[in-house]
Amino acid sequence: MLKSRHLLGIADLAPEEIAAILDTAEAMTEIAARPIKKVPTLRGRTVVNLFFEPSTRTRTSFEVAEKRLSADTLSVAVAQSSVTKGETLLDTVRNLEAMAPDMIVMRHASSGAPHLLARLCRSAIINAGDGMHEHPTQALLDAFTIRAHKGRLDGLKVAIVGDLLHSRVLRSNVQLLNKMGAEVWACGPPTLMPADLPRFGVRATTAIDEAVDGADVVMMLRIQHERMHGHFIPSTREYFTLFGLTPARAARAKPDVIIMHPGPMNRGVEIDSDVADGPYSVILEQVANGVAVRMAVLYLLAGQDAVTD
Amino acid sequence: MPQVMDADRMARALTRIAHEIVERNRGTSELALVGIRTRGVPLARRIAHALKHITGEDVPTGTLDITLYRDDLMRHAVGPQPVVRRTDIAFSIDDRRILLVDDVLYTGRTIRSALDALIDFGRPRSIQLIVLVDRGHRELPIKADYVGKNLPTSTRQSVQVRLQEIDGEDEVRLDDAPQEAA
């Protein structure tokens, strides 16, 4: 069903593969409603979660997904690992591989780090976010959430607003939404727009009202303070005044708009609490769907692995 | 190759099974039907319909997808992962008498998976097995409680159950071409 044994980015996926992952995730959602939330599918498989950047949502979501499929999981906290003693990424991973895991879920601050491992290691690699490059499972769970509400992806107007420059969520989402036929608008301050934004196949604007106007989906991105080593915005208050999603701005979208945020949210910076907690917000649904989507990815890739063994 | 069951015979077999269910369970209280995807699902619905006709009572009916419970999933390199579809059991199975429905009983491995899957949903009082065709060649100690037709076969033959709801017509065929077991 999937062509590759790794999931490195949305860039490598064909529209049919994306649809297959979303359909499989649909079947997986039911498991969360059972009294015993576990199936034996990945029994005896070992999955290593290797997170070189802090993460709560994505790491726990992968862990829950792995456990629901009965895989053996281990999570390596980098702060306590030999990385702090000067070991290289490749050496760290090769040492873990000596213990024969089947899959490695990795987050790394450097773009392309999982691609390097996919070339040089035996395990199947799942990219859980690499630098400013891709975060494929986030885009898949966003697409799943949109499809659950709208029944489709093609023809929808999706506005993505916020820190576009540092966002791997943007890069993965734009590619996925374009492949599935949605119309994507990207909005942010000029200092936070990637120079090559037009190449992404999006309509770029600095006016949030234009981006949100008539939108089916509004996706807010976090201001990534930790990646800002320059003066990209004058102040968070000014940013909120110009780009924050307020109830008045949200009202310009379609009446059945859904409001999304990949988390963690900066309330009062990119999004007003009244919107984040309001009736159009699907932010917590995104988190719940993340588990089902990651179960689907693990299941489909585990089969790929068996094929290439 | 020969058709071994046509639409009329299939309908009569299902009606007979419905009568046997009522007789054996002294009515339909606490019963529930669970059809195994794909062709167990319409068969379960037809049996529910027949039970309603006989007793006037509705028997809750659910759908079970056993893909995530298969014992051959990660074992051999056969190709891409089978498609997982939704399991849909909208009632509690605790203390119910469950009637599990499948089209063909062969090695018994599908039923083994289905039993594991069902038990993850609760603790039924009992589980009984209904199959349209029992073709023999069991690899596990499993036997059906209600059988539409016992069909002696060789392992080289393939049994094809075709149903109106999925295939546009009702029939069971026995073909000589060796095919992957359903």
Image (tube, rainbow, N blue to C red):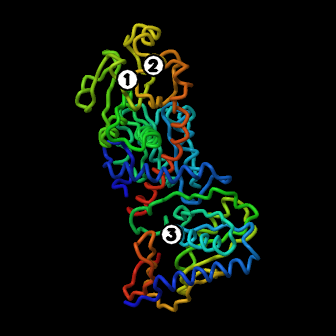
The amino acid type found where label 3 is placed reads: Asp
**Same chain letter for marks 2 and 3:** no
Q: Nearer the viewer, residue B53 or B14?
A: B53
What percent of the width, then of the height, locates residue A224? Answer: 44, 21
Rounded to the nearest angstrom, the CA distance separating label 2 from label 3 is: 50 Å
Q: Does residue A96 sit above or below A238 in this rendering?
A: below
Rounded to the nearest angstrom, the CA distance separating label 3 from label 1 is: 49 Å
Q: Is residue A91 visible?
A: no
Q: Are marks 3 and 1 in contact (CB under 8 Å)?
A: no
Crowd around label 1: few <14 · some 14–19 · many ≥20 (10 Å): many
The residue carrying mark 3 is B72
Q: Nearer the viewer, residue B67 or A74?
A: B67
The N terminus of chain A - image quarter: bottom left
Q: Single out the mark in the foreground, 3 or 1.
A: 1
The amino acid type found where label 1 is placed reads: Val
Residue at (39, 23) in percent of width and height: A161
What percent of the width, then of the height, locates residue A269? Answer: 48, 16
Q: Are marks 1 and 2 in contact (CB under 8 Å)?
A: yes
The residue carrying mark 2 is A245
Looking at the image, residue A38 sits to the left or right of residue A170; the answer is right
